[in-house]
Image (tube, grey):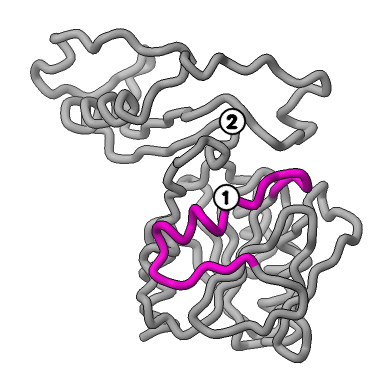
Amino acid sequence: MARLPSIPHTLWGVKRPLVDGFGRVHRDLRISVTDRCNFRCSYCMPAEGLEWLPREDLLTFEEIERVARVLVERHGIDSIRLTGGEPTIRANLPELVGMLSALPADFPAAILLVQHQHASAENRLPWLLARYCQLPVIAPEDKEEIQPGCVYVAPPGYHMLVEEDGTLAFSAGRAVLFSRPSVDELFLSAGAVYGKQLVGVILTGANEDGAKGIDYIHRRGGFTIAQSPVSAEAPAMPEAAIKTGAVSRVLDLEAIGPFLAEQVAG
C-alpha cells in the first residue's frame, strides 16, 4: 500500500455517499495497516512468500486516522475494519477487541481464548488485549488453575485444553485443520468438563475449526454464539458453526460483549 497523497480540498465539500459504478452505496471501510504476515496459510500465502513493502511506504497511524475521519464525516462510512497482512504484528497496533472491552471488571466467568497463530509467532496477543480489556489477561502456564474473571490466551503452537481438575493443559498434538492451537480442541475439552455451564463463542476465521466443538457444547447443554458472517472479516468459521444447527444465537461482533455481560454477569 503506497503512501496516500494529500487529500484534495474537494473531499471536504458537501457530504455525499460513496457510490460505485453499479449504484451500490458503500458504508464499510477496510484499512490494511500492514502487508506483512507471520502465517503461511496455503490458501493465502504463496510457497515462495511475498516481497513486503518498505516500511516507509506504509501509512502512518496519523494518516490512517485522517483518511478514516474524512470518510466517516464526509461520506457516511459507519463501519471500519483494520486488516493486513496480519494486523497484530504491526508494532503498537491496538487490537480492536470490542467483545472483551465490553465486559465489566467484575465479570464472574473465566474466558479461554484461541486465535490461530503460527507456531513460530511471538505471543503478543495477551499484551495487546490487556491494553483494552478490564479483566486480567494471562498467558497461562501448563497446569495453571483457571480463575473466574480472567482471560487466558492459548500460546502459539500448542492446543489449550481444560482438565477435569479445573486446570489448563497444553498439547503439541497434531494440528486440527492446519491449526494449533485449535478451537475444536479447546471446546471439546471444556464441554466435557463444564457441560451446561459453558458458553462457546465463534468469531471470524478462515476455516471450519470450532464447528465440531460448537456442536459438542450444544449437545452437552451449553450455550453457543456465532458472530454474524456479515460482520466477520473471514466468515468461514461462523458459517461452518451455524450450519451445524447447534448455534443458540447469531450476533454482530459489537453485540457479543454486551450480551455476555448481561447474560453471564447479570
The number of numbered discs placed on residues in the rendered structure image is 2
x and y, in percent, of residue 99 in the image: 43, 62
Q: Earlier in the sequence, mark 2 or mark 1?
A: 2
Q: Residues within 10 Å of mark 2 (few under 14, many from 20)?
A: some
Residue 113: horizontal and vertical position, in percent?
61, 64
Q: Quadrant of residue 78?
A: top left
User: What's under tag 1, amino acid-wise?
Assistant: Thr
Q: Could you say whether the residue bearing mark 1 is in a helix, strand or loop?
A: loop
| Label 2 residue SS | loop
Extreme left residue here? 14
Is residue 226 or residue 31 the one in the foreground?
A: 31
Q: What is the number of the mark on residue 45?
A: none
On the image, the x and y values in percent for residue 250 come to 50, 62
- Mostly what secondary structure, the magenta segment? loop
Asked if residue 131 is positioned above or below residue 59 in the image, the reply reads: below
Give the vertical position of 58 relative to 236 (above or below): above
Query: Separation of disc 2 and disc 1 at Cα?
Result: 15 Å
Q: Nearer the viewer, residue 66 or 27?
A: 66
Residue found at x 70% / y 59%: 155
Q: Which residue is mark 2?
A: 85
Looking at the rendering, the stretch of residues picked out in magenta corresponds to 117-139
Where is residue 227 shown, x and y percent of the image? 51, 57
Q: Is residue 166 left or right of residue 72?
A: right
Residue at 67% x, 84% y is: 145
Q: Amino acid at mark 2?
A: Gly
Judge by depth and name the residue closer to the eye, 24 or 159. Answer: 159
Residue 82 inside the magenta-drawn segment: no
* Crowdedness near tag 1: few (<14), some (14–19) or many (≥20) residues, C-alpha within 10 Å: many
The residue under the point 57% across, 38% down is 89
Q: Residue furthest bottom?
A: 165
> Which label is found at residue 204?
1
Residue sitting at x 53%, y 49%: 229
